[in-house]
Amino acid sequence: MSSLMTERILDIDSIEVLMALFGNFDQNIKFIEEETGVQIIARETQIRITGEEANVNLASNVILKLLDMIRNRETLDISRIGYAIQLARSGQEDVINELMADVICVSHRGKQIKCKTLGQKQYVNAISKNDIVFGIGPAGTGKTYLAMAMAVTAFKSKQVSRIILTRPAVEAGEKLGFLPGDLQNKVDPYLRPLYDALYDLMGPETYLKLIERGAIEVAPLAYMRGRTLEDSFIILDEAQNTTSEQMKMFLTRLGQGSRAIITGDITQIDLPKGKKSGLVEATRVLQGIKGLEFVYLTHKDVVRHELVMRIIEAYGRYEKKHKGERDTEEENEE
């Protein structure tokens, strides 16, 4: 027995809103059609949705939420539309309104920085409530950028007097000596993603002034040894590339009035073979400590190009399939 076919007509505010909904070359609407199994046709400032009743209801709910996003000057892209469809399928489309309501900070260009997924919202909430938070997940989930946004918010509201950003220069290893320039020039390439995020959030002029005052420090993890970091918001990025000793050293630098965010992707460890990841070990050692929280982001929280989500899923399936083979090989080597 075939499902009942139906149609629904939605009125759109204006041609401009309609164009924003459809996207370049109608890519947004084509994506919605593919994902929900409906046909969508535009006539002036109306759109007609036809298909099986359940699919039409799903597509209509998604489009109404996307229209709310457009009215709130949110940028639509395929990854955000895909996430909206996921939420609508599980009856959680109202969460989209909650995500739009919370503004973490405003960039120097006036862009409102907001959470785009439930995982990101959980991450930001954890940072608000804890002195130490581990944000663990794949590339593109906003781990570092959101931590930066929270650091800038804390600094501007005078909750802290300094922002300290660090990451291990593991990829450099013994090769630092072969790079041109002084030590700062040698490590700058490994810290570039941190600079880029700060430029975007604060603007280069403000950033440079705060660097000169010592209110912002960007340095390799090795520079943290022997220090006590007080009244600071500290972010350790690429923490999967710390050794056990480095992770313990970093966590014990925390002084009074300070907060620390540790971000990393445990599927992208660049340490030499035989070296344990300090981040992986921390997930086992530090569970259940009050004031410390682990937040795990997944491919569902990826906010880059939609292909990034698919690539991460594909690698996840591959790793899962071949993990048993690698474990057997390692046991044989031992």
Image (cartoon, rainbow, N blue to C red):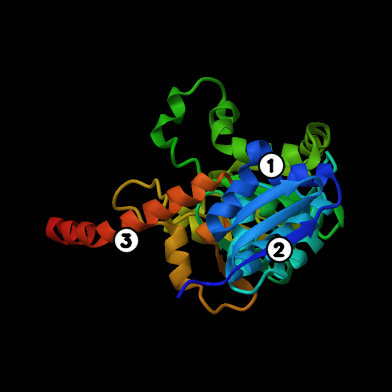
Q: Residues within 10 Å of mark 3 (few under 14, many from 20)?
A: few
**Quick one: quadrant of the C terminus?**
bottom left
* Front: mark 2 or 3: 2
Mark 3: which amino acid? Lys
Q: Is residue 254 visible?
A: no
- Quick one: SS at disc 3? helix
- The span from disc 2 to disc 3 (Cα, nearest Å) is 43 Å
* Numbered tag placed on residue 282 in the rendering: none
Q: Which residue is mark 3?
A: 320
- Quick one: SS at disc 2? strand
- Quick one: SS at disc 1? loop
231, 188: nearer the viewer: 188
Residue occupying image coordinates x 35% and y 58%? 317
Tally of numbered discs: 3
**Quick one: quadrant of the N terminus?**
bottom left
The answer to which of marks 1 and 2 sits earlier in the sequence is 2
* Numbered tag placed on residue 8 in the rendering: 2
Residue occupying image coordinates x 23% and y 63%? 324
Residue occupying image coordinates x 62% and y 51%? 144
Residue 32, image x, y percentages: 60, 54
Residue 76, image x, y percentages: 70, 48
Residue 184, image x, y percentages: 60, 30
Residue 318, image x, y percentages: 32, 54
Mark 1: which amino acid? Gly
Q: Which residue is mark 1?
A: 23
